Image: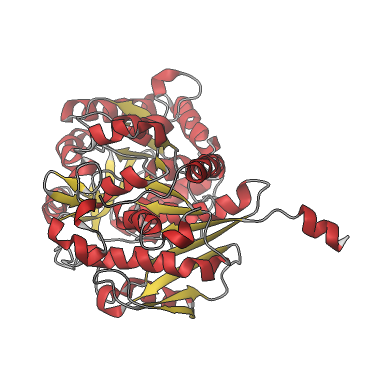
Amino acid sequence: MEALDRLTAVAPLKVLFVSAEAAPWCGTGGLGDVVGALPDALVSAGATPVEVAVVCPLYRDVRRRAAARGARFQHVTDLPAGPGAIPATRVVRVEGASTNVQFCFVDCPPLYDREGLYDDPRGWTHGDNVERFATLCFAALAASPGLLGGAPDVVHAHDWHAALAIAYARRQLAADFAAAATVLTIHNGGYQGEFDPAVAPRVGLEWGDVVFSRFEHFGRLNLLKGGIALADAITTVSPTHAQELQRDELGHGLAPHMRFHSARLSGIVNGIDTHAWDPAHDPAIAARYDRPDAAGKRECRAALANELGLDVEDQTPVIGVVARLAEQKGLDVLADAIGAAVDRGARVALLGAGDPWLAARWRALAAASPGRIAVRIGFDLGLAHRIEAGADMFAMPSRYEPCGLNQLYSMRYGTVPIVHGVGGLADTVVDEGEGAHATGFVFRPLGVETLGAALARALDVYRDRPARWLELAANGMARDSSWAPGASAYLDVYATARARARTLPAQPLAG
């Protein structure tokens, strides 16, 4: 029987995730949430066993969060210096982690032991980010055979920070990674990792790499562009956004490059961690509930109002907003449009951090409307949960949104989303006018008038058609926003990428 077991055993698929963020250890938004949740979903997705190692930088913030959780790090390996100016590092792993998913960190204090993942507290970008993330990429690859018991079958790089991992797998470490498939996921094409091309030798690239078909983009070194050119498969986080990236007006300057490589591009809608975001068991909210008309939902609204100082009665609609304070998120347009909704009796709870001018704008709105608009500047995960649970509706007027997670959190909590119909927002929210399966309100194009009209339409349904409102909320709660469909789709992408990697030679970068 033991011999038969050995003959019939299926070797696990070994996957290396390289990312600048991974929840709950480090993150600023959707990237960290995805990288924190997708590995577990991959392990649970199919008949083929999967092992995943996630490698991120050991930021100062990771040390803080680990200390707060009582987590300890186990030394894994010391690594020599890499190409160019990449320093020697060591890699550590969170103790007690699942054998199927390991969260590991590159420990290099001169690069990572500072405030801020990408920027300092003043909002200034760290000047050595190209070296910081090149070091992440090289160390993750070099350590991966020891983490996974052999070279990975798939190197899954996330956003521009990890794009050099694909280059290193095809150049400096090609002997060990020639059979590995490479997958690049674009979480936000608006951030591309652009640098002065003079830094290329410092991160192990040759001048022959800095050509327009790969890493060069109008006189700049563009890491995302190079990763797109070299990856065996490219994904982004919704089907609509995959199409948007190929359109000149929405491709962030890379649309021709995306069209050229479109045969390797697909869109997979993100999921959410349905254990961490579950109103029936969420310890961060005032009361637990499992349907939108439950008393627990009303208790959460009252508790949120009390916490933020909002004047709320039983039927007062509360509009929630949790977002980065960035132009992408359309919060400047919302600031112009929200007055009419507040004049109609709505209350607003906003949580976010980012651009100082947007923070000042929303602080001024709150100061002018005490008890009606409450603003909290900063990152507070517990408050984010309480806004999702305590709000009746949730506004997401993003200029572009590759996928978005907050509309998924909102629907999970019976909070009806109001979204600009772009990217993943268009793929996940069904407009109220589209029948029995509707889950929210979708408007196009983005503008003060169109957003104002969507807010007005939502307030009308909330007040005049309460049964329809509960139907929208219940539909959202019933939607499968888990990672199960997405994980299955990623396994299909891995299979396709592995077939391509086996039939194509390792891609030389120079020359």
Q: How many marks?
A: 0
In percent of width and height, residue 256 lies at 23, 32
Quadrant of the image for the N terminus?
A: bottom right
In percent of width and height, residue 496 lies at 52, 39
Query: Observer-nearest residue: 167 or 103?
Result: 167
Please report the residue visible at 29 percent of the width from the left and 52 percent of the height from the top.
160
Note whether residue 391 is visible. Answer: no
The image quadrant that residue 196 belongs to is bottom left
Query: Observer-nearest residue: 10 or 486?
Result: 10
Query: Observer-nearest residue: 79 or 124?
Result: 79
In percent of width and height, residue 232 lies at 42, 44
Up/down of 414 relative to 274, above or below: above
Note whether residue 231 is visible. Answer: yes
In this view, the residue farthest toward the right is 1
The image quadrant that residue 189 belongs to is top left
Up/down of 322 relative to 168, above or below: above
Up/down of 180 relative to 341, above or below: below
Please report the residue visible at 34 percent of the width from the left and 66 percent of the height from the top.
136
User: From the viewer's perspective, is 400 left or right of 461?
Assistant: left
User: Looking at the image, what colour scheme do you see?
Assistant: secondary structure
The image quadrant that residue 448 belongs to is top left
In this view, the residue farthest toward the front is 511
In percent of width and height, residue 494 lies at 52, 45
User: From the viewer's perspective, is 114 left or right of 93?
Assistant: left
